[in-house]
């Protein structure tokens, strides 16, 4: 408990800011004497553009042989009818509209500019529980690295002075009747932030019907997917390029600030301006970049330790006794053929491959596996703390439990309503039994798709075996010598191609299934979708490495008694063992996917943007309906329409979570994996930043309390990594056999001979005796050393798991999820909200009467346009009580 002596000085921070000069920066962070001209307005130069709807039509109507114009097709007529109905319902909801039509060649592009008046903003702000400011928070914000460097009196090369820092506020849900209690209520133009206006507009657009509700003809999402509208988006706040003439940094718009101080490659070693990202893109996107930066920072110690382990492997290549024995053995060890048509071979021929295997298979990997297991647990625990700090600072601490509203699509399509037990408000409801049946159907589809993945895995295993046989028959000495490596490498590349193709198919299928399941909130919808796709992707990406690590070469048999599958001898590990094949598979899949993804993220957006701009290139003749634009520069809505649609964060999270699995589950096979991940993530941060700032249309702001179900998935992976690394070290690595032989023989001399068995007498080709890997006698039976080693391996797995998991639980117990100072701030904010919204405070009657009149008119319009009253406000008795 924090204790402090009583002070005679009153704590002024507990007072609610109700001064005559409230903060003027709320809603529009402008500290510039001459701000840039705002072009996101209607033709009157005053009305703000909150959202833009776009559709394209062929400019030339069809004509008959007589030259008479033919009627449009039925689908075009239906689309026009839906658009007209939709715009009419938006007008009934109180939105202001302005239409612009631009003819470019044979295509006519129509832009509908939307703006919400003050009374509509107030009504929906209360409806969706937007949070508005009570008082400025004066506590300085710092991070742990900055604090440590400051104490060490070391210059912080990661710090940068980003202008127009968004102020932090104590906030609470908006209430029209308490308007005068909020900061900045005098200025209606800036009281609601631009991003909040976007949220309100999207809420209206997403729940407005345009046809029959029974057929689900509701919302902007359906209109865009049906190609009735080609786009719907809020506008960026001006260009991202810096002004040609030098300007005061305070005069830059937020997009220019983000580009200059975040998205440029020159900022690769600087802190991310997370509060600016949150101000412009919202909490959900800001939390993703916060997690990505946090994860990348934590990869640094893992990469350093992994690189040291790799250097230790290089040292072993030179000094390892068994490696020297193998390389100098000459013709001492004649090995049995690796396939039915293969020939005998000398063990000394794999000298360099065996030494290369020591880079990944050595005693240091045991330490590194333990280190990475504890690293994963500690990383997640400290991320929970960071997440709780950010969610409180960004007013999202209670978002999922109290504030999150039902999805607009769910609101429009739900067949009934029930009272929310937390808020007391009537909310749409979908029967759980019907959702359960749909979920079970979706699970059947998941199982079917997983079966398809396993079928492809079997096909790739057969491909490697058949390719090896074909190469051995080629009569080429070079190809015959490298047959196993060629088959393994091409199999890995083919597996990567299959993975990428199946991923696209299943992601689309999972999206359709999740939408069909009718989840209530956006968080529930995303969690269900993410879980479906991750289960599939987990099997899709990890099935081949798991097969190589734990199954390949385990069921081969021995000379004279080989096991077969479909008449083909079971696949054995290569001449140098399975661990180096696993390392190769990991590098091909992990690094290959990262390279492909980064090329796609860097090249494809630029190509798509170039093609879109080329397609929309202004023709010599242009006509603009309403008032012609005299400005020669392109309008902001036309400029933003040329950008790409933001496809969300799912692919970004999935890529990083799969990467996290590779560097933890299979880290014993590839100590360099964290280093490759670190390099990739440094590039990934800037690529993603450039996409959001420069290439994408501005996404609608979404709030989020944390990274959602991704955290649960990361925790699952961290526990699975402990089990996986225990079995990898025990059964795939040579660590325990080497340890056992050193203990029994006293030195490593003769280890190669110890690991080889003599083929049974009934297996003879040209009466030549040969050796094979295994601990068997001349009859093919397991020796006593095999069972001793098996007991050691099983004991190691149990001890490794228990020790690592115990230490992980201790770390979990030591590191609290929510820092003590954050808990105190949350309690303080609750107290302040209660004081600010107390019922005994007197308010201006004129303001109340005017707001009540406007809200009454708005309710009447909404009731007339919605037959199911999905958009009608709750009664005063049902409204959520003020905190």
Image (cartoon, rainbow, N blue to C red):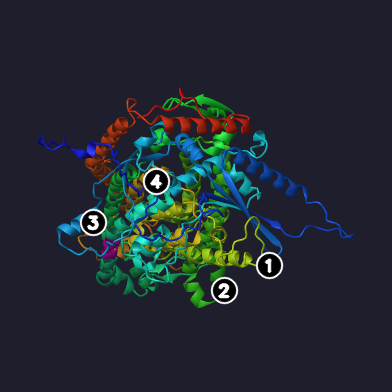
Residue 621's label in the rendered image is 1
Earlier-in-chain disc, 4 versus 2: 2
What secondary structure is the stretch in magenta mostly built from?
helix
Earlier-in-chain disc, 3 versus 2: 3
Earlier-in-chain disc, 4 versus 3: 3
Callouts 4 and 3 close, C-beta under 8 Å? no
Which residue of the protein is positioned furthest toward the bottom in this rendering?
477
Disc 3: CA contacts within 10 A as few (<14), some (14-19) or many (>=20): few
Q: Is residue 367 above or below residue 617?
A: above
Say which of marks 3 and 2 sits in front.
3
Mark 1–mark 2 Cα distance, whole angstroms, equals 66 Å
Which residue is tagged 3?
A: 145
Magenta residues, start to end: 303-309
Q: Which residue is nearer to you in this view: 669 or 840?
A: 840
Q: Is residue 81 above or below residue 476?
A: above
Residue 174, picture quadrant: top left
Mark 3–mark 2 Cα distance, whole angstroms, equals 60 Å
Disc 1: CA contacts within 10 A as few (<14), some (14-19) or many (>=20): few
Earlier-in-chain disc, 4 versus 1: 1
Residue 707's label in the rendered image is 4
Residue 703, picture quadrant: top left
Q: Is residue 68 above or below residue 247?
A: above
Say which of marks 1 and 3 sits in front.
1
């Amino acid at each position: 408990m924090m204790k402090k002596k009583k002070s005679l000085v009153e704590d002024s921070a507990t007072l609610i800011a109700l001064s005559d000069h409230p903060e003027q920066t709320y809603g529009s962070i402008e500290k510039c004497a001459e701000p840039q001209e705002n072009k996101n307005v209607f033709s009157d130069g005053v009305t703000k553009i909150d959202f833009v709807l776009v559709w394209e039509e062929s400019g030339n109507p069809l004509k008959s042989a007589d030259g008479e114009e033919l009627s449009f097709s039925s689908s075009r007529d239906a689309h026009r009818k839906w658009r007209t109905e939709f715009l009419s319902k938006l007008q009934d909801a109180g939105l202001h509209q302005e239409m612009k039509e631009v003819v470019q060649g044979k295509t006519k592009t129509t832009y509908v500019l939307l703006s919400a008046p003050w009374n509509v903003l107030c009504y929906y702000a209360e409806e969706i529980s937007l949070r508005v400011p009570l008082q400025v928070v004066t506590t300085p914000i710092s991070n742990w690295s900055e604090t440590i460097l400051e104490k060490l009196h070391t210059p912080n090369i990661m710090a940068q002075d980003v202008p127009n820092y968004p102020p932090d506020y104590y906030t609470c849900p908006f209430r029209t009747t308490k308007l005068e209690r909020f900061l900045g209520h005098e200025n209606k133009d800036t009281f609601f932030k631009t991003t909040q206006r976007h949220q309100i507009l999207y809420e209206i657009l997403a729940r407005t019907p345009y046809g029959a509700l029974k057929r689900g003809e509701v919302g902007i999402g359906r209109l865009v997917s049906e190609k009735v509208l080609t786009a719907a988006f809020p506008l960026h706040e001006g260009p991202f390029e810096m002004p040609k003439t030098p300007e005061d940094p305070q005069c830059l718009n937020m997009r220019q600030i983000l580009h200059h101080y975040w998205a440029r490659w020159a900022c690769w070693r600087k802190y991310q301006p997370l509060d600016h990202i949150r101000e412009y893109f919202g909490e959900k996107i800001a939390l993703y970049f916060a997690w990505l930066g946090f994860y990348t920072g934590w990869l640094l110690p893992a990469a350093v330790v992994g690189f040291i382990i790799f250097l230790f492997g290089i040292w072993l290549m030179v000094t390892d006794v068994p490696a020297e024995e193998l390389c100098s053995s000459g013709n001492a060890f004649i090995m049995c053929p690796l396939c039915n048509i293969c020939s005998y071979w000398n063990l000394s021929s794999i000298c360099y491959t065996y030494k290369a295997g020591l880079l990944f298979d050595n005693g240091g990997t045991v330490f590194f596996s333990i280190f990475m297991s504890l690293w994963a647990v500690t990383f997640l625990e400290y991320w929970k703390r960071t997440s709780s700090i950010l969610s409180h600072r960004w007013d999202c601490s209670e978002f999922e439990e109290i504030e999150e509203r039902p999805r607009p699509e769910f609101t429009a399509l739900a067949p009934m309503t029930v009272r929310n037990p937390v808020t007391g408000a009537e909310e749409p409801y979908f029967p759980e039994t019907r959702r359960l049946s749909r979920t079970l159907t979706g699970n059947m589809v998941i199982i079917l798709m997983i079966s398809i993945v396993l079928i492809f895995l079997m096909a790739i295993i057969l491909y490697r075996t058949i390719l090896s046989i074909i190469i051995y028959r080629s009569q080429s000495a070079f190809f015959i010598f490298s047959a196993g490596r060629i088959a393994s490498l091409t199999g890995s590349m083919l597996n990567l191609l299959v993975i990428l193709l199946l991923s696209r198919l299943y992601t689309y299928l999972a999206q359709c299934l999740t939408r069909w399941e009718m989840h209530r909130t956006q968080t529930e919808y995303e969690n269900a979708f993410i879980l479906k796709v991750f289960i599939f992707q987990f099997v899709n990406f990890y099935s081949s490495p798991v097969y190589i690590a734990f199954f390949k070469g385990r069921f081969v048999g021995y000379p004279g008694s080989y096991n077969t599958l479909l008449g083909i001898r079971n696949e054995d590990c290569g001449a140098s063992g399975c661990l180096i094949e696993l390392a190769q598979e990991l590098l091909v899949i992990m690094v290959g996917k990262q390279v492909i993804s980064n090329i796609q993220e860097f090249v494809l957006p630029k190509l798509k943007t170039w093609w879109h701009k080329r397609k929309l290139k202004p023709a010599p003749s242009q006509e603009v309906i309403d008032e012609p634009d005299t400005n020669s520069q392109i309008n902001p809505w036309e400029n933003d329409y040329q950008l790409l649609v933001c496809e969300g964060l799912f692919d970004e999270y999935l890529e990083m979570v799969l990467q996290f699995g590779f560097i933890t589950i299979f880290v014993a096979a590839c100590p360099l994996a964290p280093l490759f991940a670190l390099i990739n993530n440094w590039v990934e941060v800037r690529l993603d930043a450039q996409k959001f700032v420069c290439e994408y249309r501005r996404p609608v702001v979404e709030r989020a309390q944390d990274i959602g179900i991704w955290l649960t998935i990361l925790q699952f992976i961290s526990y699975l990594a402990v089990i996986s690394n225990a079995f990898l070290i025990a059964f795939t690595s040579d660590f325990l056999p080497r340890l056992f032989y050193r203990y029994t023989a006293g030195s490593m001399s003769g280890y190669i001979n110890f690991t080889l068995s003599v083929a049974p007498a009934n297996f003879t080709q040209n009466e030549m005796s040969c050796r094979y890997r295994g601990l068997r006698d001349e009859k093919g039976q397991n020796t006593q050393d095999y069972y001793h080693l098996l007991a050691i391996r099983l004991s190691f797995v149990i001890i490794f798991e228990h020790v690592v998991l115990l230490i992980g639980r201790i770390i979990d117990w030591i590191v609290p999820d929510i820092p003590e100072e954050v808990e105190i701030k949350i309690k303080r904010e609750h107290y302040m909200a209660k004081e600010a919204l107390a019922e005994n405070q007197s308010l201006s009657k004129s303001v109340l009467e005017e707001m009540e009149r406007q809200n009454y008119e708005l309710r009447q319009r909404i009731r007339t346009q919605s037959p199911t009253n999905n958009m009608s406000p709750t009664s005063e008795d049902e409204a959520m009580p003020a905190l």
